[in-house]
C-alpha cells in the first residue's frame, strides 16, 4: 500500500538534495527544496490510465493516488462552498500517501493561509509542515500576474487601444478592428485573464527539472464565474491576437522603413512578441485543462438548490470545453443524528431535497458523488485537514 510506504519515503526524501534551480523557470522559494523525485510503489495495473468504461465505484482515492506520473486536480465551484478546504485536504491526503504535492491558489481572494493556519502569502513556494511526504503551497498574486499584461498595453506610457495599436504600428487600422472588442482586451484585462496567467506561470515553472518531484498538483481555483471566463478566454485571445499579429505582419514590410526612421521598430516587435507569448501561454492553459490523461476538474458544491443549479451549469460549460470532470463533492452535509432540533430537522429536509435533485439532474447524475460532512469545528491546520481528507477522499 502506498500509505505504508510514506514514512520510509519521507525519510529518504530528507536525505536527498537537489541541484540549484534553473534561472529561466525559477519561482522564489521560502526555503531551498531538499527533496528529490520519489518513486512510489504501485502495481503495473495501477500505472495504466483509467479506462473510459470505468465505473463510479472505481473512482476512489486509490485511483487518484495510483499513478506516479504527474496529475493535476482543479477544484472549483460557487464561492464559499468549501473549495479551499477540499483542495487543502486533498493535498494533505496526497502528501500523506507518498506523493510530493503542490497546492496552488489562483483565487484572487486567497484562503490557503487560513486553511493551513500558516502564512503562505508572498507568491513563493512555502513548505507546509506536518505531512509524511513534502507538501508545498503557493498563493499566486493575481495583481502581479496582471501587471505583466499591463506592460504590454502601456508600452508607450499611455493606456488604451489607440496607444497600443500605435505601438504595434497598427494605429491606422484601429477602427477596422472594432469588432474584435480590443477595448475589452486591452483597456481592462478580461476577467479570468489574471487567473489564466497565474496558472500558465505554474505550468511554466513546473517544467523545470528541480520541480519534477511534484507528482500531484492541486489547484484551488477562483469561483465559478472566473473559471468559465478563463475557459473561454484562450479562444477569444487566440482569435484576437492571431488577427492582430496577422494584420501587423501584413503591413510590417510596407511601414518598416518609415518606422525605423522614428526608431519604433524595436518597441513594436517587443509588443508583438509579448502578445504572441501571451497567446501561446493561454493555449497551454487550455491544453492542460483539457488533458484527460493528466487533469481532472472536481466540482465542489453544497446541498442547496442554488449551489446545485450552479454546479450543473458549471459542469455543462466544462463539458462544452472538453474539460474532464468525473467527481462532485457535496460539502457540508449534516451528519446523521437521532435527536434533531426543529431547525436541524428543517435543514436536513432541505438538504435531502437538494441531494435528490443531484440524483435526477441530467448534468450531475453521471458523476461520482462524494459527500463531506458539516463538521462542528472550523477546518484549520494540517490535523483538521487530514481529518476532513480521510472522510472525503476514500
Ligand atoms: N465540511 C465543513 N464543515 C464545517 N465547516 C466547513 C466545511 N467546509 C468548509 N467549511 C468552512 O467554511 C468556510 C469557507 O470554506 P472555504 O474557504 O474552504 O470555501 P471556498 O469555497 O474556498 O470559499 P471562497 O470561494 O471564498 O474562496 C471556512 O470557514 C471553512 O472552514
Image (spheres, rainbow, N blue to C red):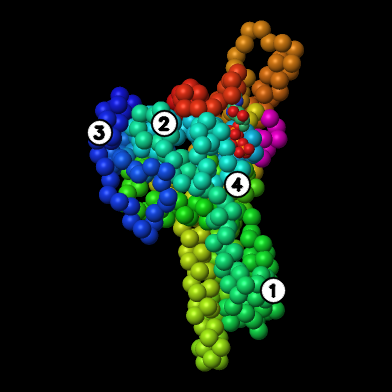
**Taking 42 as reference, is 321 left or right?**
right
Per the model, the C-alpha gap separating discs 4 and 3 is 36 Å
Q: Position of residue 130 (x, y in %)?
A: 41, 28
Per the model, the C-alpha gap separating discs 3 and 2 is 17 Å
Tell me if label 2 and label 4 are in contact, CB under 8 Å.
Answer: no
* Residue placed most toward the observer, 202 or 357: 202
**Residue 326 seen from this side:** yes
The mark that comes first in sequence, 4 or 3, is: 3
The mark that comes first in sequence, 3 or 1, is: 3
Q: Which residue is mark 2?
A: 129
Q: Position of residue 259 (x, y in %)?
A: 55, 88
At x 64%, y 55%, the residue is: 191
**Residue 300 seen from this side:** no
The mark that comes first in sequence, 2 or 4, is: 4
Q: Is residue 192 magenta?
A: no
Q: Which mark is residue 391?
A: none
Circle 3 — which element?
helix
Give above or below for 257 relative to 150: below
Segment colored magenta: 304-311
Per the model, the C-alpha gap separating discs 2 and 4 is 24 Å
Tell me if label 3 and label 1 are in contact, CB under 8 Å.
Answer: no
Location of residue 23 (image quadrant): bottom left
Q: Which residue is mark 3?
A: 12
At x 47%, y 27%, the residue is: 382
Q: Which residue is mark 1?
A: 178
Tell me if label 3 and label 2 are in contact, CB under 8 Å.
Answer: no
Foreground tag (3 vs 2): 2
Circle 4 — which element?
loop
Q: Which residue is mark 4?
A: 108
Amino acid at each position: 500500500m502506498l500509505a505504508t510506504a510514506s514514512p520510509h519515503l519521507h525519510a529518504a526524501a530528507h536525505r536527498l538534495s537537489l541541484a540549484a534551480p534553473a534561472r529561466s523557470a525559477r519561482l522564489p522559494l521560502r526555503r531551498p527544496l531538499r527533496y528529490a523525485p520519489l518513486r512510489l510503489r504501485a502495481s503495473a495495473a495501477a500505472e495504466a490510465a483509467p479506462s473510459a468504461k470505468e465505473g463510479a465505484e472505481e473512482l476512489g482515492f486509490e485511483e487518484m493516488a495510483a499513478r506516479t506520473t504527474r496529475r493535476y486536480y482543479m477544484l472549483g465551484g460557487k464561492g464559499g462552498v468549501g473549495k479551499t478546504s477540499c483542495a487543502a485536504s486533498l493535498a494533505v491526503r496526497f502528501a500523506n500517501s507518498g506523493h510530493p504535492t503542490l497546492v496552488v491558489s489562483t483565487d484572487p481572494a486567497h484562503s490557503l493561509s487560513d486553511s493551513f493556519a500558516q502564512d503562505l502569502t508572498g507568491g513563493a513556494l512555502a513548505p507546509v509542515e506536518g505531512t509524511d511526504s513534502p507538501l508545498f503551497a503557493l498563493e499566486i498574486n493575481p495583481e502581479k500576474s496582471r501587471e505583466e499584461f499591463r506592460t504590454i498595453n502601456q508600452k508607450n506610457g499611455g493606456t488604451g487601444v489607440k496607444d497600443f495599436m500605435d505601438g504595434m504600428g497598427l494605429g491606422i487600422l484601429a477602427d477596422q478592428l472594432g469588432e474584435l472588442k480590443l477595448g475589452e482586451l486591452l483597456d481592462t484585462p478580461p476577467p479570468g485573464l489574471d487567473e489564466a496567467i497565474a496558472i500558465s506561470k505554474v505550468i511554466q515553472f513546473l517544467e523545470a527539472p528541480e520541480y519534477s518531484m511534484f507528482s500531484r498538483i492541486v489547484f484551488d481555483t477562483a469561483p465559478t464565474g472566473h473559471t468559465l471566463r478563463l475557459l473561454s478566454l484562450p479562444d477569444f485571445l487566440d482569435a484576437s491576437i492571431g488577427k492582430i499579429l496577422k494584420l501587423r505582419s501584413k503591413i510590417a514590410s510596407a511601414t518598416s522603413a518609415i518606422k525605423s526612421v522614428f526608431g519604433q521598430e524595436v518597441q513594436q516587435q517587443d509588443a508583438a512578441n509579448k502578445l504572441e507569448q501571451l497567446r501561446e501561454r493561454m493555449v497551454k492553459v487550455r491544453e492542460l485543462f483539457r488533458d484527460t490523461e493528466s487533469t481532472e476538474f472536481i466540482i465542489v458544491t453544497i446541498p442547496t438548490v442554488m449551489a446545485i443549479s450552479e454546479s450543473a451549469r458549471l459542469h455543462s460549460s466544462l463539458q462544452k470545453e472538453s474539460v474532464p470532470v468525473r467527481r462532485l463533492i457535496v460539502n457540508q452535509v449534516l451528519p446523521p443524528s437521532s435527536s434533531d432540533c426543529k431547525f436541524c430537522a428543517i435543514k436536513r429536509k432541505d438538504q435531502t431535497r437538494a441531494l435528490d435533485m443531484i440524483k435526477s439532474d441530467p448534468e450531475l447524475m453521471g458523476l461520482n458523488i462524494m459527500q463531506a460532512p458539516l463538521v462542528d469545528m472550523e477546518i484549520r491546520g494540517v490535523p483538521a485537514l487530514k481529518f476532513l481528507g480521510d472522510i472525503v477522499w476514500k
